[in-house]
Image (cartoon, rainbow, N blue to C red):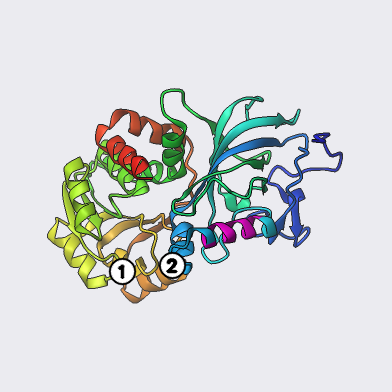
Amino acid sequence: MDTRQPTTPSSPVGVHRVLEPVGSSLPQAARRLDTRPQVWPDEVRIDIETLNLDAASFRQLHDKHAGDGAAIRDEVLEIIASRGKMQNPVTGSGGMLIGTVADVGPESTLGLQVGDRVATLVSLSLTPLAITDGLERWDGSSERIPATGHAILFGRTIAAKLPDDLSPELALMVMDVCGAPALVSRVVTSYAARGLAPTVAVLGGAGKSGSLSLAAARQSGAGRTIGVVPFKAEADLLTDSGLADQVVIADARSPLGLSEAVAAAGGPADVTVVCVDVPGCEQPAILSTAEGGTVIFFSMATNFAAAALGAEGLAADVTMLVGNGYVPGHAALALDLIRSDGAVRRLFEARLAAG
């Protein structure tokens, strides 16, 4: 492989890798990226081991193809081949990856060295990506994809070295959603700093981001935690874990159903965290939140116009935050939660074992 560094100027945010439309887009919004393996002076090339699709993207693909694994795999391959990145055209989201550092440009400031095993902490929807094995080891039935190929990290791309005390698969699952508990911790801590112990409701409380958010809320000073799940099996799982003070079964898309369930469990919530991967949860979440409270949207299925207009239509005085996936120290915080909180770790390990 020719890995000589290009001599044309680069951009720390990756504009130089945008092929379509040239010169007018950041990689996230671009239609197609340059995936050449040669690194610019501030870039890093990663040899891929595993891709992890985000939940909203995988659900959309699964539903579109009625669970047909071969069709799901074919579409993922087509997206990557045509766009030079993994960006679901419906959800706009991607996921993340783990791999081994193969090349480091001389001007890179990411602190990585050849041979480091890392997880990327930015979305695959902006990461130049090339697949060389046809995803032949993936049956299309889960979010985790064993893969061979390479990815490019820009000058400002964030990545974390995989910890030695956790399996790569477990670390990937945690870091895929590490922005959620970090922002929840920040918000709950701000209440605690004012002498308040907020009620925190997490929609999708048995999932990855949801369970970590419940653990972070409890650790940061929440007075009451409410886990909302759609099915009894998830309710039993979350109840057994002890992560939530109250567990309720409710459809997060039902405004009255959700708000009444949260109220019966001790709400309305001061902080409502949306971690479900289905659309239509905007107004129910707002209606379940107390006046002056906070709604944090982490789902990539969220329609933010619907959230804004829904709050206006309900005359709801709530602060709405977009969970952008990045909070300083987010990976370390999430990994520490897995290490210190046995309940959330058991949920993650059970999910991992289930495939």
Residue type, numbered disc 2: Ala
Looking at the image, residue 277 sits to the left or right of residue 100; the answer is left
Tag 1: residue type? Arg
Q: Element type at marker 2?
A: loop
Q: Main secondary structure of the magenta part?
A: helix
From the image, tell me which residue sits under label 2.
Answer: 66
Q: Which residues are magenta?
A: 71-80
Viewer-closest of 203 and 268: 203
The Cα atoms of the two marked residues, 2 and 1, are separated by 22 Å
Image location (x, y in percent) of residue 259: 22, 66
Q: Quadrant of the C terminus?
A: top left
Q: Is residue 7 covered in magenta?
A: no
Describe the element under mark 1 as helix, strand or loop: loop
Can residue 152 be seen here? The reply is: yes
Label 1 sits on residue: 253
Callout 1 environment at 10 Å: few (<14), some (14 to 19), or many (20+)? some
Q: Tell me what residue is drawn at x 54 percent, y 54 percent.
A: 94
329 on left or right of 10: left
In the image shown, does 296 or 87 lie closer to the viewer? 87
Q: Is residue 326 above or below residue 73?
A: above
* N-term-proximal mark, 2 vs 1: 2
